[in-house]
Amino acid sequence: MFSVLTWQWIVLVGFSLIMIIITPFVKNNDGFYRGTSKKAEKPGIVMLTFSLVISWIFAKSVTNAANLGLSFGIVGGFAYATYYFSFLVAGIVIYKLRTKLNVKSLHHFLETKFGVGALRFFTIIVAIRLLNEVWSNTEVIGTYFGPIGSPQYIISIIVFTTLTLTYALKGGLRSSLITDLLQMALFAILLFVVLGMILPKAGSVTPFLKTGHWTLAGGFDLVLVALIQIFSYPFHDPVLTDRGFISDEKTTLKSFIIATVAGFVFILLFSFVGIYAQFLGMSGQAAVEVSKSLGAVGMIVMNFIMVTSASSTVDSTFASVSKLIVVDLGKKKIATVSKGRWVMIIVAIGGTIPLIFSPTILSATTISGTMVLGLAPVFIFWKIPAPKISFHLALWTGVIAGAVLVFHLLPQNMFISEGPFAELLSVNLYATILILIVYFVPVIIKKKE
């Protein structure tokens, strides 16, 4: 009889090999960078919706949802699920940009409206985000195989990244879209298997829904933070926004709307894992601890969920970063699939080495939701003519706000609540007001000239 650890290795390697087998070998740019089929068909509504949802239900995301459920009950799960309204915001904005301005990407829009300087600054933010997607998801996988820094932890990360990179290299975005279909279906099945294990032990769904307190002190302040950040957060994530330009406009908008509902529901349901951990008086990483309490089968299923969600995001990250470097920033006439594959390899190495040698540096290089608050007026008010300085003032105000949050520079007497996320909410609210001011003042001055 195999041990639990052996089964986890079987799941990791076996699942990845299946992904490698089912993905096509793509030779043309449209398939590799835009996800078209061999017959030049664009992704349909089912493929696009599934891809949107599973690429955003990443390993770190479900881990956070469970941990918030553990800390704040259903309020914590609801707060994290609120971030999935980012799909709705991004979907509407991208639909308008495509139908009204005929832009081909967010980079195209920024360069056209705000110039090369804005494009470069935005690219730096996006690049850091993409690297963070690699290590934040592979780190979660590693923790299921051993303590951070242990040989098992490091080996599992290297194996997982290598296998995921292999099928990403085969087909780029097309591979990502095809595997997302299977990954989404598996995630849904496995989630309901886990819920089937824990719900009967609580008697019904009712005890889960009655947990937590809908007050600022009970974690509702994070809901308010999410409602602020959804107007800026999605635009710095090309894993999401790239999918807004690969199908026709109406199909894309419908997919983003459906993904909003599906993403919200799935994340809220996964927070039940953390709420169950709360019932049992657990502490630490909720998903890990609950999986242990469910025995060997529970641990294997939870590991399978993490592998599924992590691989869907990491392969999408490889596809997005190759498009960013080769197509969005490069000369499209000389863009080739081979260049995209080399970019993927470099990112896989660059996103893994720091995690192996110094995990503590990762928090310092993560672009937070606060730091990108300045993107909100840039994209939400796309129709309003704004000078280049508006973009830079808004973006840098957000970056400074992020620094204020990281170094705890906001005096406590300026906090607008006493909840667990009081500092986060306060900085985000003040920063948003200031960002709107610095963005629109140049607009007003320009009109008066």
Image: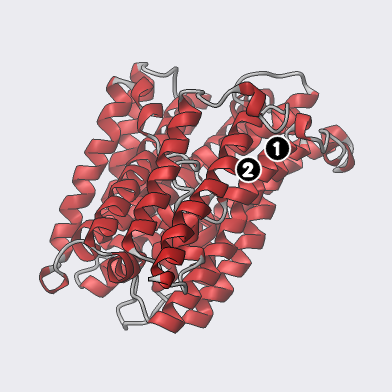
User: Does residue 30 lie above or below 183 as drawn?
Assistant: below
Q: Which residue is mark 1?
A: 221
Q: Secondary structure at mark 1?
A: helix
User: Does residue 112 lie above or below 263 as drawn?
Assistant: below
Do the residues under discs 1 and 2 have CB atoms within 8 angstroms? yes
User: Does residue 358 lie above or below 366 as drawn?
Assistant: above
Residue appearing at x 54%, y 58% in the figure: 53
Give the class, few, some or many, for how many residues have Cα within 10 Å of label 1's Cα (few <14, many ≥20). many
Q: Which residue is mark 2?
A: 225
Q: Secondary structure at mark 2?
A: helix
x and y percentages locating residue 217 in the rendered image = 77, 29
Front-most of residues 328 and 265: 328
| C-alpha separation, residue under disc 1 versus residue under disc 2 | 6 Å
Residue appearing at x 66%, y 33% in the figure: 68
* Quarter the C terminus occupies: bottom left
Q: Does any portion of residue 180 appear in the rendered image?
A: no
x and y percentages locating residue 59 in the rendered image = 50, 40
x and y percentages locating residue 15 in the rendered image = 43, 46
Front-most of residues 273 and 38: 273
x and y percentages locating residue 348 in the rendered image = 26, 42
Q: Does any portion of residue 78 appear in the rendered image?
A: yes
Front-most of residues 30 and 432: 432
Given the image, on which type of amino acid does mark 2 rest? Val
Given the image, on which type of amino acid does mark 1 rest? Asp
Residue 393 left/right relative to 158: right
Number of labels in the image equals 2
User: Does residue 13 lie above or below 154 as drawn?
Assistant: below
Q: Quadrant of residue 420?
A: top right
Residue 98 left/right relative to 220: left
